[in-house]
Structures are given as C-alpha cells and as structure tokens.
Image: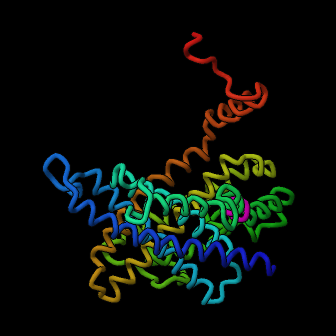
Amino acid sequence: KVAMGILNNGRFGLGAGTGAGMRWMATAILEHCATRKQFGRPLASFGLVKADLAFMAESAYAAEAMAYTTTALIDNGHPDASLEAAACKVFGSEAMWDVVNRCISLMGGLGFADGPDAPPFSRMMRDSRILSIFEGENRVLRLLIALQGVRGPGASLSAVAKNPLGHTSELPALVADRLYGLGLESVAASLAGSGPGASVATSSAAPALKGAAQELAALVSAHGTTVRSALTRHGKNIIEEQQQLERLANNAIDLFASAAVLSRASTAHANKSSTAEHEILIARSFAAKAATRIRARAGDIMSKPASDADTIAIADGMLKHGGYVPAHPLTL
C-alpha cells in the first residue's frame, strides 16, 4: 500500500509537471513563430502553424486541468485516485513529447541544434522521452486503467449471469449505463446540469459549454455500454485482448481530460476571469476533438476490427521468421 501510494504520487506529480513544461514551450515557440518569416510572411500567419500552437495550448490546459481535478478528488477524501494519477501521467507524458516535437519542427534545423546558445528544445526532447517510462511505462498503465475500470462491471455481470433471479437488485445499475472507474459519471452528469455534485471545481457548465458538457455526459453513458459489451464478448479472456483494452483506456483518459477541461473553463467563467473567453475556446475545441476520437475507438471496440488479428499475425510471423520477413525490394 505504501509503495502504491508513492507510485501514485509520482505519476500525479509527473503529469502535473508536464503541464508546466508545455505551458513554457507554448510561450517560448510563439516568439519565434511571430518573428520568423517564410514566403514574405510570419510563420504564425499560416494555418498549420496556428494548429500547432492551438494544440500546445489545449494540451497544456488539459494536463493542468487533470492535475487540478485529481487534487480536488484527493482533498475531498476520494478513497483511491490511482486511476486519475495514471491518466494524468499517460496523457501528460505523451502530450509533452508531441509538443516538444512540434516546437522542433517549427524551429527547423535550429531546433535540433545543441550548445549553450542553442534553443533548449533538443535537450527537452531527450528529457521528455523518459517521461512515458518513469513511474510505470505507459502501455502498462493503460492496461491498469482498463482492467481496473472493468473490474466492477465484470464482477456484477458474472454474478448476474450465474444467478439472474438472485441479483435483481443489481440489474438497474447495469442497465443505467454507469461508467465504472475514474468517477466519470458524476462529473459528466454535473457538467450537463443534472445528477449528483462532482468532486471538481464546478458543478455546472458555462453557457457556451453546455452542448459540449451534454455530449460528454452522453459519451460517458455510451462508454459504460461499451465496457459491458466488451466484457460480455470476451469474459475473463479480455485480459488477453490488449488492443481492445488500450482503446478502453484511451477513451477513459479522453473522457476524464474532457471533464476536467470543461470544469476548469466553467470555473473561469463563473469567477469572471479575464481569460475565461479564451479558456472556453480551448475547452470547446479540446472536447470536440476528444469526442471524435472516443467515438472512433468505441466503434472499434464494439466491432473488433479484422486488422487486430492481422496485427497479431504479422508479429507472430516476425517471431517465427526471426526478423523482418519481406524480401528486399532490389531482389524482386
């Protein structure tokens, strides 16, 4: 228990630190993009560059919001924030790597330079790479998130299947499309304006975010259905369906991040913050993109793409062959 507590603190702290790192990089690269000219105009005037800058802002904002929400859960006496801590670490470490990679691309060759007078991004790239390995490699943490998240509904479904008439009291909870793990149901319901209060900074979405909050509530409900569908199909063998578990974990992380982001922006609006309007833009954009990812993965979980089997077969072929299998193109 003590060891797990230390790991959870490390994961949570790592995720929180990436928010600060991405915030710094987003500001540092902005000066370059605003002053560097290509084709007679500043880099910052190009649409794809603006998309990179927006991604950095959204990633930093989400990482900070997830850390803040996790802190609120801990401060409010939540018995176990291990999944939230893991989600903070996975999201933050991978977003940090993506942000520094984009910074180097925007800097061009100079971004990869090293030395006392060079930009810091090449060093930051090397340093940020370890973040997905420290405190638990991210693929392992995704399995933790997915398997912990399906434990509750798995036990309930097993009990109902063995004795349906003896567990009628549990059926409403199963039918209600509740999400097990990460406490997302109450968060989403609160942001949508119904349900119990969530352990986050605000219990209602800003008017401009009502639509996004209602969509989040629907996605949380659908995720509960997706979890149970996967359990019904695979049963105990779901532990071997790691591609499916990865999708479940990624959706849980995106749901948690969306809830945290919408909550943070709504708090800024409620407090009449001078940056509230901009924060609402960030939250709405992040939630919309996350919703698209969530729906795509949910479809794959429900249908289990044939490409999953092909992926396993390719790896098995490499193992059997002892390396890369295809003939060199010059031998064709």
- Above or below, comparing residue 159 to residue 315 in the picture: below
The foreground one among 144 and 45 is 45
The foreground one among 283 and 319 is 319
Query: Which x, y percent locates residue 299?
Result: 55, 46
Q: Which residues are magenta?
A: 145-149
Query: Which x, y percent locates residue 68?
Result: 51, 80
Residue most extreme to the top: 332
Q: Residue at x 38, y 55 (%)?
A: 111
Is 181 positioned to the left or the right of 66 in the image?
Answer: right
- Above or below, comparing residue 323 to residue 203 in the picture: above
The answer to which quarter of the image holds residue 59 is: bottom left
- Above or below, comparing residue 132 to residue 199 in the picture: above
Check if residue 66 falls in the magenta segment: no
Query: Which x, y percent locates residue 253?
Result: 56, 63
The foreground one among 270 and 31 is 31
Query: Which x, y percent locates residue 39?
Result: 16, 46
Can the viewer see residue 102 in this picture? no
Residue most extreme to the left: 40
Q: Quadrant of the C terminus?
A: top right
Type of secondary structure dominating the magenta stretch: helix
Can the viewer see residue 315 in this picture? yes
The foreground one among 187 and 101 is 101
Q: Quadrant of the N terminus?
A: bottom right
Residue most extreme to the front: 116
Check if residue 147 falls in the magenta segment: yes
- Above or below, comparing residue 318 to residue 188 in the picture: above
Q: Residue at x 44, y 53 (%)?
A: 292
Q: Residue at x 57, y 79 (%)?
A: 70
The answer to which quarter of the image holds residue 4 is: bottom right
The answer to which quarter of the image holds residue 168 is: bottom right
Is 25 positioned to the left or the right of 327 in the image?
Answer: left
